Image: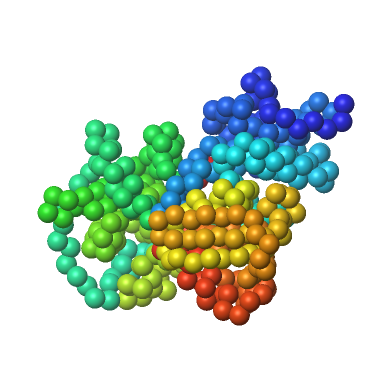
Amino acid sequence: MGLEIRAARAEEMDELKRVAHTSLIVSISADINPELTLCAFKDGKLATSYVAWELTMRLNGGDIPIAGVTMVGTLPVFRRYGLLRKVTAAHFKQLHEQGERPIAALHASRSAIYQRYGYAVVQTRNTYNVEPEYLEFVDNQPVTGTFMEVNDNNLELLTGLYQRFISDRTGYLIRSPEIWQKGVLSPPREGSVLSRIAYEENGEPLGYVIYTANLKRESREMLMHDLFIRDLIWNSPSAYRAIWDYFSRMDLAEHITWQRAPADDPLPHLLVEPRMLNISSYAGLMGRIIDIEKAIPGRHYEAEGDLTFEIIDELCPWNRGSWKLETSVEESRIRRTEANPQVVMPVSTLALLMFGQISATEAARMGRLEARQPGALPLWDSIIRTRYRTSHADFF
């Protein structure tokens, strides 16, 4: 029967979950629409699982539909046959032909697997692991607002604050009710407590934090626990400071952990002892530009100008060649061009620039971009920059 690449059928969903679970060693409980799958079948057996959620992401203040790739795995007995490469190439072609989702994104167990397919690490994810006593600010300012618990009857308070926060940012998802309930608002594990706390000043909500408290150790003298931040949103500097001041008063917490701190998060620049955050950095979200013609105009730009560039792309031949991008604050246009390119780069570097992970000058210093014209790099830096570094608070 050989190799077949197709969507899994409804009756094959349990087998798809088994393949993903066996490959990734993680629990798979999500309900999956068969139309969102594209799998490899070897001699009639499901060998490679692959699912792509239909999501929308903020990209420097613009909304862009993306394919959120997940549950990717190949059974060990079918590895080293190039099955994932074939599935990935088929998915890219499918996305291009459908013309609706010009970017694919994923969270990788190993970045090396997906960089071979033109993905780039477009987010650096930081983790803080701090003891409450070290949450002391250099210029200690009084908290003037108040905190309140958010219950099931006023969850719209959280959604409104979140939408305001992500309005001009990059990487955050437009959350559907399902994403909220299965993500940051999902029930905690047994024995843990979920808290949802909002902060307001003069009656105006300005931020919130969602976290869990997990019992760490129990003795006759004291019950100690650890706090894990799921989501932290602030719409003013005072709200940000107030939330961390709130955590500084957690006397029974041994550690406070935030695993999704943005790369440009302000806390390291505000504390008396920032090293006590014990910051560790990881490769976060990976992005892949599937269709340049639709993806590049989908984000906002901060300046007006004309950019010409040549793209190298092994898996998406429709992206190859030279392009001209005309930008303004209001809109942008892109088309094929015969003009000499200002810069030449692989499609993965273009993703790094579009998401604001690095600048064109930094890419050139790394050897990930070749400048062909004088003055090209400062021009690209001024036009391509994003207002914030990419951050991503959800998992798919």
Q: Could you tell me residue 52's position as x and y percent?
A: 59, 38
Residue at the far bottom: name it.
Answer: 374
* 364 left or right, relative to 252: right
Q: Going 53% across and 66% down the picture, which residue do you hit?
A: 306
Residue 26 location, quadrant: top right
Residue at the far top: name it.
Answer: 11
Total residue callouts: 0
280 shown above or below 17: below
379 shown above or below 327: below
* 84 left or right, relative to 146: right
Q: Going 21% across and 50% down the picture, which residue do you hit?
A: 205
Q: Going 23% across and 44% down the picture, which residue do you hit?
A: 149
Residue at the far front: name it.
Answer: 338
Between 3 and 279, the one nearer to me in the picture: 3
Residue 215 can be seen in this image: no
Q: Could you tell me residue 165's position as x and y percent?
A: 33, 53
Residue 25 location, quadrant: top right
Picture quarter with the N terminus: top right
245 shown above or below 362: above
* 355 left or right, relative to 249: right
* 241 left or right, relative to 25: left
Q: Could you tell me residue 184's position as x and y percent?
A: 40, 43
Between 29 and 60, the one nearer to me in the picture: 60
Q: Going 67% across and 43% down the picture, which residue do you hit?
A: 92
Between 191 and 122, the one nearer to me in the picture: 122
Residue 117 can be seen in this image: yes
Residue at the far left: name it.
Answer: 202
Identify the coloring.
rainbow
36 shown above or below 298: above
Q: Could you tell me residue 191's position as x and y percent?
A: 39, 40
